[in-house]
Image (cartoon, rainbow, N blue to C red):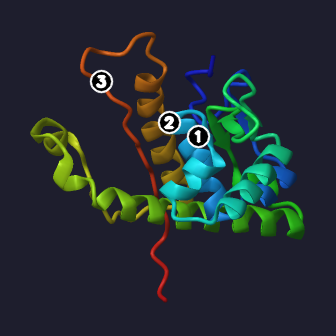
Amino acid sequence: MTDPTAPLSPDPDRDISLDAATLRVLAHPLRLTLLGRLRQYGPSTARQLARLYDLDPGAASYHLRRLAAGGLIEEDAERGNRRDRWWRAVHRQSFHDPADHAHAASDDADSRAYTQAVVLAYGEQLRRVASTVPLLSDDWHAAAIFADYTVELTPAELDAMKAEIVATVAKYRNRQASSPGSERVSVQLQAFPLVEE
C-alpha cells in the first residue's frame, strides 16, 4: 500500500516508476492513450482500439507491441484466440519525477519528451470528453468540474500544492469499498507556469 505521507510515491505492488527505457516507449501520445484506455476500461484487442481511435489496425498492433516490449502491458491469454490478441495493462499507474531525470542531458530529454506526450494525450482525451458532456446525468453534470485557476507560486509552493491535491485524491482512491452509485471518474491535474508564446 502507498505510504499516505508520500502520496506521490508509487505502490510497488500496483504501480510503475518510469525509467529511461519506459519514458522513451511512452514518449508518444497515442501509446499513452492506448495504455490509459486499458487501465481505465480493462482488456481490449488492437482491432477494438483501432476502431475506437480511428486507427489502422496494423498501427494499433504496432503501438501495443511497443507497450508490451516496455513491460507496460501484457497479452491476456485467457481472452485471446487465433484471430484476436487481447491486451491488458500491467500496472495501475505510471509515476515519473522529472527531478530524478535531470542529472544527464539524455535523461532530461527523455523526461521532457514524455511530459510533452502526456500533455498532448490529455488534450486529446479532453477533446473526446467534450462530446459526452451533453450525455451526462444532471447529478454528474453538477458534480463534474472543468476549471482553471491562475495563482502566483514559487516552484516549492507549487510542489507543496501538488502534494496536497494528490493526497486528497489518494484518500478516495485507496478506499476499501466503493459507495453505492459510484462510477469511475477521471481526475486530471495540470499545473504549469504561464510562459509567453
Q: Earlier in the sequence, mark 1 or mark 3?
A: 1
Residue 29 is drawn in which quadrant? bottom right
Give yes or no for contact between labels 2 and 1 (Cβ–Cβ under 8 Å). Answer: yes
In percent of the image, x 55 and y 48: which residue is there?
A: 48
Q: Which residue is mark 1?
A: 38
Residue 62 is labelled as none
Marks 1 and 3, how far apart in space?
20 Å
Which numbered circle lies on residue 182?
Answer: 3
Kindly report the distance in space between the C-alpha atoms of the residues bearing marks 2 and 1. Answer: 5 Å
Residue 148 visible in the snapshot: no
Amino acid type, label 2? Tyr
The numbered mark at residue 41 is 2
Which is nearer the eye, 65 or 80? 80
- Secondary structure of the residue carrying tag 1 is helix
Q: Is residue 130 left or right of residue 74?
A: left
Q: Quadrant of residue 137?
A: top left
Q: Residue at x 49, y 65 (%)?
A: 192
10 Å neighbourhood of mark 3: few (<14), some, or many (≥20)? few
**Disc 2 and disc 3: Cα gap in Å?**
15 Å
Near-viewer residue (122 or 5): 122
Amino acid marked by disc 3: Ser
Q: Earlier in the sequence, mark 2 or mark 3?
A: 2
Q: SS at mark 3?
A: loop
Kind of residue sitting beneath label 1 = Leu
* Neighbours of disc 1 within 10 Å: few (<14), some (14-19), many (20+): many
Is residue 141 among what the camera can see? Answer: yes
